Image (cartoon, rainbow, N blue to C red):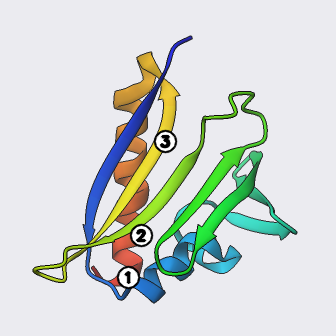
């Protein structure tokens, strides 16, 4: 199956540090991304209802971005990333989500990200 790069941008009303905390800590991720999250060194285990998946933290930069790779994914260049983008002129903050999905699942994954980011925005009061 062909994989495509999905890039979505969401306006978020939050301080960069507060948003970054929700993208990298177990407590922050468990608020909006998964039901529960555990970390063992750089391996994150995400729990949802009856399933769990593991991702490796590839790289992060405080208050700027976090990049993960699902361990079950064999594609080395396939990752998902959260990038905090601040407009220099207005100071507006956006969260850019990059993900790699099967070509026939773009709409489904876009809708899933919309739902998850909607939950994140609610938690942040955005």
Camera-side mark, 1 or 3 = 3
Q: Is residue 48 left or right of residue 3?
A: right
The residue most toward the left is 89
Callout in the foreground (2, 3): 3
Find numbered disc 2 in the image and state the secondary structure of the residue it sits on: helix
Q: Secondary structure at mark 3?
A: strand
Per the rendering, the mark at residue 34 is: none
Q: Which residue is rendered at x = 55% and y = 47% of the image?
A: 80
Q: Is residue 93 above or below residue 44?
A: below
Quarter of image, res 21:
bottom right
Instruction: Find the residue positioned furthest to the top.
Output: 1
Neighbour class for label 3 at 10 Å: few (<14), some, many (≥20)?
Answer: many
Q: At which x and y percent is residue 75?
A: 68, 28
Which of disc 3 and disc 2 is earlier in sequence? Answer: 3
Picture quarter with the C terminus: bottom left
* Residue 114 coordinates in the image, percent (x, y): 34, 51
* Location of mark 3 (residue): 99
How far apart are the alpha carbons under marks 1 and 2?
Answer: 6 Å
Secondary structure of residue under mark 1: helix
Task: Left or right? Give the position of 55 relative to 5.
Answer: right
The image shows residue 104 at horizontal and vertical percentages of 42, 16
Between the C-alphas of marks 1 and 3, the distance is 22 Å
Q: Position of residue 51 (x, y in %)?
A: 75, 44
**Which residue lies at the image location 87% right of the left edge and 69% below the top edge?**
41
Q: Residue 124, labelled with which disc?
A: 1
What residue is at 48 percent from the left and 80 percent from the top?
A: 63
Mark 2 to mark 3 CA distance (whole Å): 17 Å
- Locate residue 96 relative to residue 126 in the image: left or right: right
Q: Is residue 65 above or below residue 45?
A: below
Image disc number at residue 120: 2
What quarter of the picture does the N terminus occupy? Answer: top right
């Amino acid at each position: 199956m062909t994989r495509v790069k999905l890039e979505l941008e969401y306006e978020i009303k939050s301080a960069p540090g507060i948003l970054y905390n929700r993208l990298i800590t177990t407590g922050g991720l468990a608020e909006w991304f998964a039901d529960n999250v555990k970390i063992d060194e750089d391996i994150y285990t995400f729990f949802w209802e009856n399933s769990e998946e593991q991702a490796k933290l590839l790289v992060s930069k405080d208050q700027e971005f976090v990049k993960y790779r699902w361990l079950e994914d064999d594609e080395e260049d396939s990752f998902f990333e959260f990038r905090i983008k601040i407009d220099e002129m207005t100071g507006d903050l956006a969260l850019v989500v990059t993900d790699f999905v099967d070509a026939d699942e773009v709409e489904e994954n876009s809708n899933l990200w919309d739902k998850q980011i909607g939950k994140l925005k609610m938690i942040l009061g955005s």
